[in-house]
Image (cartoon, grey):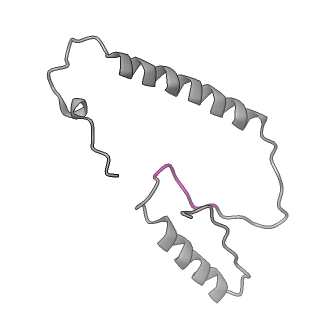
Amino acid sequence: MKLRTPRDWYRRDRVGRRPGLLFLFGLLAAGVWTRVTARRIARARSVDPGIPVICVGNLTVGGAGKTPIVRELTKALIARGVAAHVLTRGHG
C-alpha cells in the first residue's frame, strides 16, 4: 500500500483560513502524546550499566547514516582492543 502526501500540505491559498477539523484533531493528539511522553520520561529511573556506553541515534527514522557510523565505530574500537558489542532496536 503506497501512501500519498496530502494535497493540502502544498496548497498556498490557505492563508487567512481557519484550520480544518483534521488539523485541530492532530494538534490535540500531538499535545496529549507530548504530555504522556514527558510524564513517562520523568518517571524513568536511570541505570548505571557498569560499563561505558555509546548511543548512536537521533529523531530521523531512516537514511541518516546511523548504521554505517556504528559499523565504523565498532571496527575502530575492536582495532584498539576494546571488546565492543552492538545492541540494536532496528528494523525487524
Q: Is residue 66 above or below residue 10?
A: below
Front residue of this view, candidates 1 and 44 = 1
Q: How many marks?
A: 0
Q: Is residue 3 above or below residue 34?
A: below
Q: Is residue 39 magenta?
A: no
Magenta span: 55-60
Front residue of this view, candidates 33 and 78 = 33
Residue 1 as seen in the image, left or right of residue 45: left
Picture quadrant where residue 25 is located: top left
The chief SS type of the magenta part is loop
Picture quadrant where residue 14 is located: top left
Name the residue located 78 percent from the left edge and 34 percent from the top edge.
43
Residue 58 as seen in the image, left or right of residue 54: left
Name the residue located 80 percent from the left edge and 67 percent from the top edge.
51
Residue 16: image location, x then y, percent: 21, 12
Residue 14 as seen in the image, left or right of residue 32: left
Name the residue located 66 percent from the left edge and 72 percent from the top edge.
86
Front residue of this view, candidates 58 and 34 = 34
